[in-house]
Image (cartoon, rainbow, N blue to C red):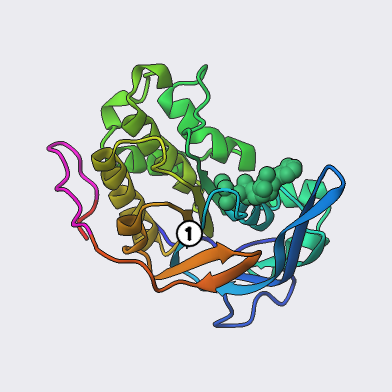
Amino acid sequence: MLDSPTPAPGANSSGPAPGAPLVRLRGLTRSYREGERIHRVLDDVDMDFGRGERVALLGPSGSGKSTLLNLISGIDTADQGSVEVDGTDLTRLSERDRTLFRRRHIGFVFQFFNLLPTLTVEENLLLPLELAGQVSPDDRRRASTLLEAVGLADRMGTFPDRLSGGEQQRIAVARALVHRPLLVLADEPTGNLDAETGLLVLGILDDLVRESGTTLLMVTHAPDVAARADRVLSVRGGRLVESSSVQGTTVLPPAPSGLRYPPR
Ligand code: ADP
Ligand code: MG
């Protein structure tokens, strides 16, 4: 139903080597000044993320998870090191080119949904497409397909404040995928939802990224969420380490009637 991500224009002319990871972090370092002191939040991080890989990021509050996502999206800039996405080193792009790259190739899901309150559900959903260029009839069809996939096809003209938190996050999930990104970054996407709703939203996100072959990096505190990922990493002492401490899995609840996310 959903198409695979489009290859990245704007990548270096020869393109990424076949089989190369989608994301390559090398020597990534980011510090913040705290009064007199320098706090090195990320310290020489090396890591690769494969195409279509679904990665859970754990770590205590303040350990640098959001900082890492912000560096990978090019919202924040590193002190040292490189961030390559699909063969393009974001640290070598101008701020404008980084913004264009991000709009085109990256989708986001935030803890607080971040829908624009003055836009309808449909307008919120079409926004990433409008930012990336003109909206084609094919784009509109994709937006409708995604709305259906998240079970909210009948809410196109509704404003976000009429939706529950779970519904808003389902729209945000559709919005994160509407422009066929290569990479979706999710920062505690269930952090503001009750457990059951959180699992429902994650089930939808998981199905959609799997189906479209999109890479997912997701910050979470919930072990049962992390257990669904292909890989679990922790941010600890400024480093990113493979984590094997996730226990317990939770079976996702069945989709409520009328919700037609694709079967696993
Ligand atoms: P996490 O997402 O794991 O909770 P963050 O990445 O948000 O942690 O923050 C990591 C550390 O960096 C914290 O100590 C935080 O205070 C600090 N930090 C993050 N962003 C900034 C900033 N813009 N200015 C100063 N310090 C920051
Ligand atoms: Mg955070």
Label 1's element? strand
Q: Residue furthest right?
A: 36
Asked whether, in this view, residue 98 is left or right of residue 157, the answer is right
Q: How many tags in the picture?
A: 1
Residue 39 lies left or right of residue 132; in this view the side is: right
Residue reaching furthest bottom?
18
Is residue 247 depicted above or below 176 in this figure? Answer: below
Residue at horizontal 47 percent and vertical 38 percent from the top: 111
Q: Is residue 101 magenta?
A: no
Return the residue nearer the eye: 187 or 93: 187
Residue 72 seen anywhere in this rendered image of the structure: yes
Q: Position of residue 26 (x, y in %)?
A: 71, 73
Is any atom of residue 1 visible in this view?
no
Q: Residue at x 46, y 40 (%)?
A: 175
Most common secondary structure along the magenta stretch:
loop
At a point 35% along the width and 38% down the height, the residue shown is 170
- Judge whether residue 257 is colored magenta: yes
Residue 36 vertical position relative to residue 263 in the rendered view, above or below: above
Whole-percent x and y of residue 72?
65, 58
* Quarter occupied by residue 20: bottom right
Judge the density around disc 1: few (<14), some (14-19), many (≥20) Cα neighbours within 10 Å: many
Q: Quadrant of the N terminus?
A: bottom left
Where residue 240 sits, quadrant-wise, is: bottom right
Residue at the limit of the structure toward the front, as seen here: 36
- The answer to whether mark 1 is within 8 Å of ligand 1 is no
Q: Where does label 1 land, which residue?
A: 58
Residue at the image position 23 percent from the left and 53 percent from the top? 262
Magenta span: 250-261
Task: Give residue 107's position: percent from left, percent from top.
Answer: 53, 48
Q: Quadrant of the C terminus?
A: bottom left
Which amino acid, by three-letter code, is at mark 1? Leu
Q: Position of residue 91 (x, y in %)?
A: 79, 61
